[in-house]
Image (cartoon, helix red, strand yellow):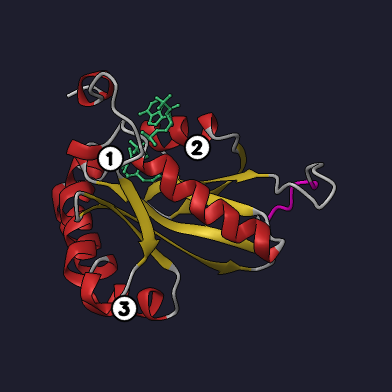
Amino acid sequence: MSRAERKPAGSSTADVVVRQANGNDLAAVEEVGRQTWPATYSSIFEEGLVALFLEKKWSAQALTPSIRSGRTLVAEVAGRIVGMASYGPHDSVLALWKLYVIPEAQGRGVGGRLLREVMSHAVSLGRELHISFTDGNASAYEFARSHGFTILSREPQGEMPDLIWMARPTPGEDGCTQAAVTDG
Ligand SMILES: CC(C)(COP(=O)(O)OP(=O)(O)OC[C@H]1O[C@@H](n2cnc3c(N)ncnc32)[C@H](O)[C@@H]1OP(=O)(O)O)[C@@H](O)C(=O)NCCC(=O)NCCS
């Protein structure tokens, strides 16, 4: 299904609630990964690797520390969790570690709402926000680019596709943007 087909005419983000995740959200956050990872990465990674990453990065054990430390956000529509974001300090910047919206809810502004919330945390911490994604994830690249991010660097991942890092300058107190900080 194309992005245009997923986006119903007149849809708005008014019915999207973005909030900090808590322990009760764990199963729903795991489910966002289970629904989104195969749809996103089956054309980039082989099937076994998608299953392996799901097990490694979307297990209760992997997700709990970020939820406990208040660095996971969820997006709800009509009380159902349809997207999540997690972030944390990375060297001198703030890194967006995960940003996922289930396929059926994509293209309606949910990802944008989650990203804006993380960006506001970056601004309040005075840190630049960096996004990373696997080379070949064209929709992540287009999404980040449409939100003002530009490519910073490419991180080799052995035999797997490179990780692409993008950054968006954080507005300073005077409203001017600060110079980009690279983390290699
Ligand atoms: C990337 C992702 C989080 C975007 O979430 P979303 O809810 O679909 O995005 P939004 O509807 O908020 O899009 C906001 C803007 O980003 C841009 N955009 C988003 N996806 C795009 C795409 N596939 N192609 C082109 N532009 C895109 C558009 O400019 C859009 O503005 P519009 O409403 O005027 O069309 C979501 O598609 C997703 O979960 N993808 C799979 C996981 C992933 O790749 N995560 C890593 C992200 S860094």
Q: Is mark 1 within 8 Å of ligand 1?
A: no
Direction from residue 64 to residue 39 in the image, left or right:
left
Between marks 1 and 2, how big is the CA–CA gap? 18 Å
The amino acid pointed to by label 3 is: Thr
Magenta segment includes 180: yes
- Percent across and percent down for residue 98 are 39, 56
Question: Which region of the structure is painted magenta?
Answer: 178-182
Q: Residue furthest front?
A: 14
First in residue order: circle 3 vs circle 2: 3
- Rendered position, 72 above or below 118: below
- Does 62 appear above or below 10? below
The yes-or-no answer for disc 2 within 8 Å of ligand 1 is: yes
Q: Residue 135 lies in what quarter of the image?
A: top left
Q: Which mark is residue 64?
A: 3
Q: Which residue is mark 2?
A: 144
Would you name the residue on which mark 1 appears?
44
Query: As displayed, is residue 20 above or below residue 41?
Result: below
Please check the rendered image and state whether residue 153 is part of the magenta-colored stretch, yes or no: no
For marks 3 and 2, give the CA distance.
Answer: 26 Å
Which label lies toward us, 1 or 2?
2
Q: Residue at x 21, y 26 (%)?
A: 6
